[in-house]
């Protein structure tokens, strides 16, 4: 598990290029995961990661990891090096959303 100390992002600082076979994924988390890098992978492909950051929007804020420009497919979201937290389908032209489990029990569940 990697952690970083990134500041919050503001409205309008993230631009997603969606279309064709390219989609995106947002993983929503609790604030206590701020700075943690969450890994995802498609099939047997190499894992990629993104850091959880606070996202400030007009009505408040939330915490999430963002994966832009993903090829369509089914992705595994990794709880740790060996344990999947779940899977999510990403479709071209769309933003997929995944809610991070609150405990390892939910993952094993």
Image: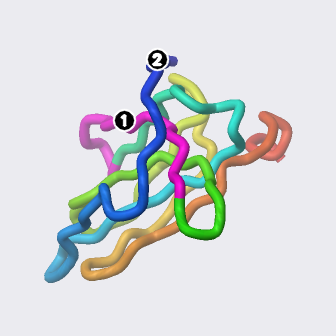
Above or below, 30 against 59 in this view is: above
Residue 23 vs residue 6: left or right?
Answer: left
Which of the 4 image quarters holds residue 94? bottom left
Is residue 76 one of those drawn in magenta? no
Task: State left or right for residue 70 relative to residue 105.
Answer: left
Q: Is the stretch drawn in magenta largely helix, strand or loop?
A: strand
- Image coordinates of residue 23 in percent, x first then y, are 28, 70
Q: Which residues are magenta?
A: 42-56
Q: Taking 15 as reference, is 65 left or right?
A: right
Say which of 62 and 44 sits in front.
62
> Mark 1 and mark 2 in contact (Cβ < 8 Å)?
yes
Pointer 2 or 1: first along the chain: 2
Expressed as whole percent of the image width and height from the top left, the position of residue 87 reads: 54, 57
Q: Which mark is residue 49?
A: 1
Labelled disc at residue 2: 2
Which residue is depicted at the point 50% across and 63% down? 88
Question: Is residue 46 part of the magenta span, yes or no?
Answer: yes
């Amino acid at each position: 598990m990697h952690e970083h100390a990134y500041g919050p992002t503001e409205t309008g600082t993230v631009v997603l290029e969606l279309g064709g076979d390219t989609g995106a994924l947002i993983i929503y988390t609790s604030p206590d995961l701020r700075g943690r890098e969450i890994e995802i992978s498609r099939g047997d492909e190499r894992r990629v990661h993104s850091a959880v950051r606070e996202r400030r929007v007009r009505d408040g804020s939330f915490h999430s990891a963002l994966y832009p420009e993903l090829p369509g497919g089914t992705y595994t979201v990794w709880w740790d090096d060996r344990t999947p937290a779940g899977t999510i389908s990403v479709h071209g032209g769309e933003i997929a959303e995944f809610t991070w489990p609150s405990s390892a029990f939910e993952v094993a569940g």
